[in-house]
Image (cartoon, grey):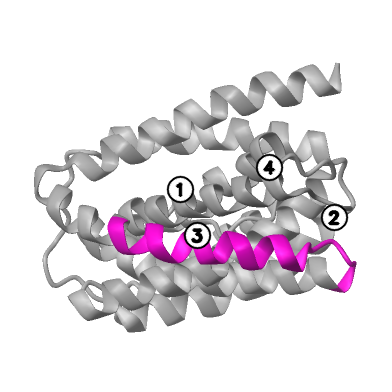
Amino acid sequence: MTLDTIQYLFGALSGGIVGFTLGLVGGGGSILAVPLMVYLVGVSNPHVAIGTSALAVAANAASGLAQHARAGTVKWRCGFLYAGSGIVGALVGSIVGKAIDGQKLLFLFALLMLVVGALMLRGRNNPGIEGAACNRHNAPAVLGYGLGTGGISGFFGIGGGFLIVPGLIASTKMPILNAVGTSLVAVTAFGLTTALSYAASELVDWKLAAIFIAGGFFGGIAGTRAARILSNRGSLVAIFAGLIFAVAGYMLFRSASALL
């Protein structure tokens, strides 16, 4: 697959958008990366878009993680527990996902986004428990959520932050700002696992990934700063859900049209 200069410029712009949303809401990057690759950049093969975006999102998530770590919002023990079990699920899920038609994957992905957006809105007034941490009592729940969301993330070829954030909140009761920061540990791990699986099948555009990552670096800095400002007003969840619904609606329209 050969892209032109304009498409690579759109790749840099898309990376900036993804980096900003990763820094802001943790899970927005994966939600936006695949549709941006397909519908804005113009990557014709959905599986190449999925594999390339998984690599780019993993790198951008690592950058966002560094920002959150400096701000002290990452619960490292929870992040490593969640990521450890999720990597297994992501590997299995990615193998299954590559065998499914690309347009069907995009359609199913959009339906999943609608469900997660609704669940996030239901819990938007839950402030969480300050100082919540992972311990022997909630570790089984953390590991279980990690395995499940890792499998879904690998299947759809995404970092999975929009699943990881509510998973961390449900299993530990931590505040959303901590869940956003901690989720980036797992987003990085899931994205790398999925990207390696797709790269083994030659479904990664390395040049586009590099340009996407460069744009995401600068967007991530701005998004992390915005997250610290907005978190105190509960606006993160509303922005999070709004992104999910908007992109899901567009993806349903485009993927359904392609399938029909």
Rounded to the nearest whole Å, what is the CA distance between mark 4 and mark 3?
13 Å
Q: On the image, which quarter does residue 96 sit in?
A: bottom right
Which residue type carries mark 4? Val
Which residue type carries mark 1? Ile
Query: Residue, x 42% and y 73% (percent of image)?
Result: 63
| Residue 98 circle label | 2
Image coords of residue 227 (percent x, y) = 23, 54
Whichever of callouts 4 and 2 sits on the residue coming sooner in the sequence is 4
Q: Is residue 210 magenta?
A: yes
Examine the rendering and report whether any part of residue 143 can be seen. no
Would you say 247 lies left or right of 34 here? left
Judging depth in this view, the residue of 229 and 166 nearest the camera is 229
Judging depth in this view, the residue of 61 and 180 nearest the camera is 61
Q: Tell whether label 1 touches label 3 (CB within 8 Å).
A: yes
Highlighted range, magenta: 200-222
| Residue 17 circle label | 1
Give the class, few, some or many, for how many residues have Cα within 10 Å of label 2's Cα (few <14, many ≥20): many
Whichever of callouts 3 and 1 sits on the residue coming sooner in the sequence is 1
Pointer 3 residue: 215
Rounded to the nearest whole Å, what is the CA distance between mark 2 and mark 1?
26 Å
Rounded to the nearest whole Å, what is the CA distance between mark 3 and mark 1?
8 Å
Please identify, in this view, whether the residue under mark 3 or under mark 1 is nearer the observer. 3
Specify the quadrant that holds the C terminus.
Answer: top right
The relative height of residue 9 versus residue 148 in the rendered view (above or below) is above
Query: Residue, x 17% and y 58% (percent of image)?
Result: 228
Rounded to the nearest whole Å, what is the CA distance between mark 4 and mark 2?
21 Å
Pointer 4 residue: 41
Query: Residue, x 67% and y 73% (percent of image)?
Result: 193
Give the class, few, some or many, for how many residues have Cα within 10 Å of label 3's Cα (few <14, many ≥20): many
Outermost residue to the front: 5
Query: Residue, x 14% and y 61% (percent of image)?
Result: 129
